[in-house]
Amino acid sequence: MITVGGYRLRILESGSGPAVLLLHGFAGSSEDWRGSVAWLAQAGYRAIAVDCLGFGRSEKPIQVRYSLELISDLYAELLIRLGIECATVAAHSMGGKYALATALRYPQQINRLVLVASDGFAPASPLSRVGGWPWIGTALMHLAAHPLLVRNMLSAAFYAPERHVTAALIEHAQAALSGENRQALLTLSKHYAATDLHESGWRARLSELAIPCLLIWGEEDRIFPMPYAEIAAAEIPNAHLVRIPHCGHFPHIEQPRSFRGILAGFLAAGV
């Protein structure tokens, strides 16, 4: 654990060399990147995966206004606390919009972006705002943690769910939607507009990005289908889109060999 901006954040760290900061997606944690952290360390990089505020084992305040500004401030300060002058940020899903905000607000600290099935380009679901619906929101969050619904949500996220959606994964996802995690998610949802790339105004500023950006997308992603990858590639300057066949919303988990090969080439080009 490390204290950043007055909040306790959990990190996984390994290796030495050029820094790569890894950001997870919604209801995820740094554990989603554990295999990538070990691989990056062996490849000669300093890999740091962090549990976002409100997720995983990081602190889960409920009396705070979550926003792209708050989270990007924390990531920028985290790099300073770790003695890292500049880093590549690799971010999955929800983490993508936080990575973009950090790169826009702290361009001197971020030298490259890797966005994996990134949030920020698809229309937001009305359910993203359930925290603003008294009683109803709480009831819906309870319902979302039901094992059958969790299984269905996870199955939609993988091209081959029979290989990846295990009882252990379902149990882990249920825990991420229950207890203090549920309260943090409801608080986050109350302030959804402040964490939305479009509504916050940061999407309109993507043209200001002046660093290389790699987009990695599963061709069979049913969470953020390929048309949104193409929109992202059109809106982000210097963006290069790579599609991974036979892959859903989690390329780094479902197709790790392909994902790591693509990432290795991109990182090596910046050394």
Image (cartoon, grey):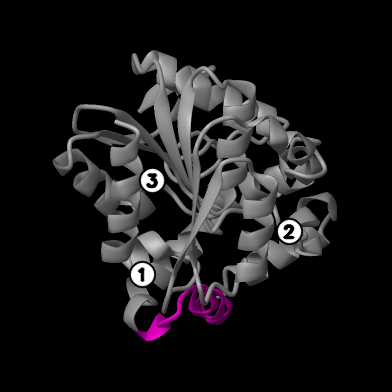
Please tell me whether residue 60 is drawn above or below residue 153 in the rendered image: above
The boundaries of the magenta stretch are 147-162
Give the residue type that dot 3 points to.
Answer: Ser
Residue placed at 38% from the left, 46% from the top?
30
Q: Nearer the viewer, mark 3 or mark 2?
A: 3
Q: Which residue is mark 1?
A: 254
> Label 3's element?
helix
Say which amino acid is labelled 2.
Thr
Figure quadrant of residue 205: top right
Give amino acid for label 1.
Answer: Glu
Magenta segment's dominant SS is: helix
Q: Is the residue marked by circle 2 packed among few (<14), some (14-19), or many (20+) residues within 10 Å?
A: some
Q: Find residue 37 and report its horizontal and vertical position in percent.
A: 27, 44
Circles 3, 2 touching at the beta carbon (< 8 Å): no
Circle 3 packing at 10 Å, graded few (<14), some (14-19), many (20+), is many
Position of the C terminus by quadrant: top left
Mark before the other along the chain sequence, 3 or 1:
3
Of callouts 2 and 1, the N-terminal one: 2
The answer to whether residue 67 is visible is: no
Q: Which mark is residue 30?
A: 3
Q: How far apart are labels 2 and 1 at the CA level?
A: 32 Å
Q: Nearer the viewer, residue 232 or 90?
A: 232
Find numbered disc 1 in the image and state the secondary structure of the residue it sits on. Answer: helix
Q: Label 3 vs label 2: CA separation?
A: 26 Å
- Residue pointed to by mark 2: 138
Relative to 8, say whether 243 is above or below.
below
**Marks 2, 1: nearer the viewer:** 1
Q: Is residue 128 visible?
A: yes
